[in-house]
Image: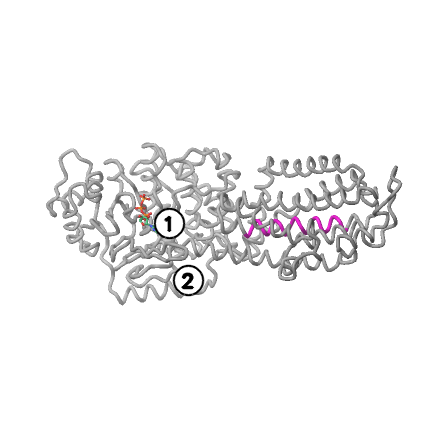
Amino acid sequence: MEAVLQEAASVTLDTNGASAYANLNPTEEDTVVPLVNQTEDAGFSMLPSTEPVDMQFENIVFTATTGLFKKEKKEILHKINGRFPQGQLIAIMGPSGAGKSTLLDVLSGYRITGIEGTVYTNGTPRDLNAFRKLSCYITQDDRLQPLLTVKENMKVAADLKLGTDVTQKEKDAIIGEILKTLGLDKAVNTRAARLSGGQKKRLSIALELVNNPQVMFLDEPTTGLDSSSCSQCVKLLQFLAHQGRTIVCTIHQPSASLFQLFDQVYVLAAGKCLYQGSTDNLVPFLEDVDCPCPMYHNPADYAIELACGEYGEDKIDRMVKATDNGKTISWLKNFDVLPTQKALKDKYRKAARKTDQSESLHATSASHQLKILLKRDFLKSRRDSTLTYMRIGVNAITGLMLGTLYWQAGVDGSKVIDNYNLLFSILMHHMMSTMMLTILTFPNEMSILTKEHFNRWYSLKMYYTSVTLVDIPISIFCCIVFTVIIYTMTAQPPDMERFGMFSAISILVVFVAQSFGLMIGAVFNVVNGTFLGPTLSVPMMMFAGFGVSLKDLPPYLYWGSYISYLRYGLEGIVGAIYGMERPTLDCPGEKYCHYKYPTKFLKDIDIKGDQFTNDIISLLIILFFLRIVAYVLLRWKLVAVR
Ligand SMILES: Nc1ncnc2c1ncn2[C@@H]1O[C@H](COP(=O)(O)OP(=O)(O)OP(=O)(O)O)[C@@H](O)[C@H]1O
């Protein structure tokens, strides 16, 4: 085992982190010990990080801007400083609202606005893009694909985060190695949704470990875990840190034993640094500032109590002064003194040059990302069979209900108005069922997208293309099922051309409504989206020419009819049924047949029956426009949350 580790230490890490694992070929003697059985000298064959990153930050101020119209500024971090040495597990501790998550967001590069001050990596100002290639961020909530198994989740991560030059065999070796090390090898075939809290957390870490990041940020990794899972999780982080990584996590109130597992601790109170140093030095520091920790008291608890102001605000001021708001590094332990500035600069330049060589933030090409994302999305929709069957079922049942209600109305001259109502109802069905489905499901995807996109799994363009493409087959299938049922039951003209036109308009309305839902779902949460979607659809209905015919619209409102996709849908679908010189209609059992001539009906509702091509073009333009707007909004949202 020792030999393997020695060999490992000599392996140079490539930009994808692949080679660090590439030589892995564990023999029986090298058998890795699962996390649960870890001991000091238990041999982990996972290889150490080889390009350690020392972090330092100076005079960090973070100002949040709140309020939509009247902008208010609130300073959350007040000129704090600190030093996070490589190869150490660092806890950011403090009471609720102290600014722990904010500091983590700033240091990880997740927050990019409202920040002043400088973050250094290995002594030189951080280049955010280069830094993002070396680091990862693991959120407090485990944003995993619930329908995919542990192995499938890992395979997607490996396919996206390791370069295409890494072979499948090497990827499998890396995955196997990480899962074994993290004690997940017994759960490889378990879906992420069915994992325990601790396993989910370990899977979140495993996914990001695939490309061997040098710096890891974890927001409250122990939240929601029982004490044994907590200590397993922190021991794992300690092990990973001692391989040379810089691991920073926020933590609420650790028990004494958990606290001891951290190498360094950074205590915050109301955006100021109270202490920065090793866990062992906390008690001597408290004595030094004349706030001695009572005997048998957990120093972590006592530090939090002090930070909460339970023993007086003067003590907080004293501690901030003693640490010079994080500038003092004399309480840190076991960290290397930074090499000289020149050496650092050379090293940094070299690293930057290496990073510059690969222009993209992502490890794989756009087409490869799309291939993997499509594979994942198809697998997800296959697994989510309830939703797929529900979609087909809803279309079939609604088709049967409307078909029964408007039985044979399409061929009957005395039921032309009924049939017109039916055509509008069909458009309503397509609009509401697709739009609401997207509004309800997309916000859930947003949280996973935010995490994976920030951790550079793929570009937003490829994600969006995959989301767009993957739904096409099922949407068309559902629409065709509905159309066949309704068309035959209501006896619309038995003419393939008319059926084709009817179906084409229906499918386009489905896709436009889906884009409309995507636009709303990208920006708003489920509650706001559910309110906004139908509300914004009302003007679309108003301007469709149903109820109030277009010729009766006041001139100053006529513009509305140009932007209402339902107007083009209605015009196209009515044209398909009553246009193209449809022969006269019979009114069985009636003496007087008002709409014997379809042209008379078209004239009465002010719809020309020959606008099909225009309607298709207009719907296509609206479709592309909404898709682009939805993409722009999604991009904006990803930046705005930061
Ligand atoms: N974008 C923002 N706009 C307004 N206030 C903000 C924003 N971000 C953070 N805050 C405020 O800054 C303070 C610190 O927030 P932060 O989430 O960093 O605290 P925390 O120490 O992580 O708390 P907890 O342990 O409860 O998660 C809080 O009072 C929070 O309300």
| Left or right of residue 332, residue 571 in this image | right
In this rendering, does residue 170 appear at all? Answer: no
Decide: few, some or many residues near mark 2? Use Cα within 10 Å; few <14, some 14-19, many ≥20: some
For the residues marked 2 and 1, what is the alpha-carbon distance in whole angstroms? 22 Å
Front tag of 2 and 1: 2
Picture layout, residue 147 above or below residue 521? above
| Left or right of residue 203, residue 413 in this image | right
Give me the disc on residue 413. none
| Left or right of residue 153, residue 391 in this image | right
Viewer-side residue, 379 vs 253: 253
Report helix, strand or loop for mark 2: helix
Over which residues does the magenta segment extend? 501-519
Q: Amino acid at mark 2?
A: Thr
Give me the disc on residue 8. 1
Give me the disc on residue 355. 2
Q: Position of residue 384 (x, y in %)?
A: 58, 38
The image shows a total of numbered marks equal to 2
Q: Position of residue 356 (x, y in %)?
A: 43, 65
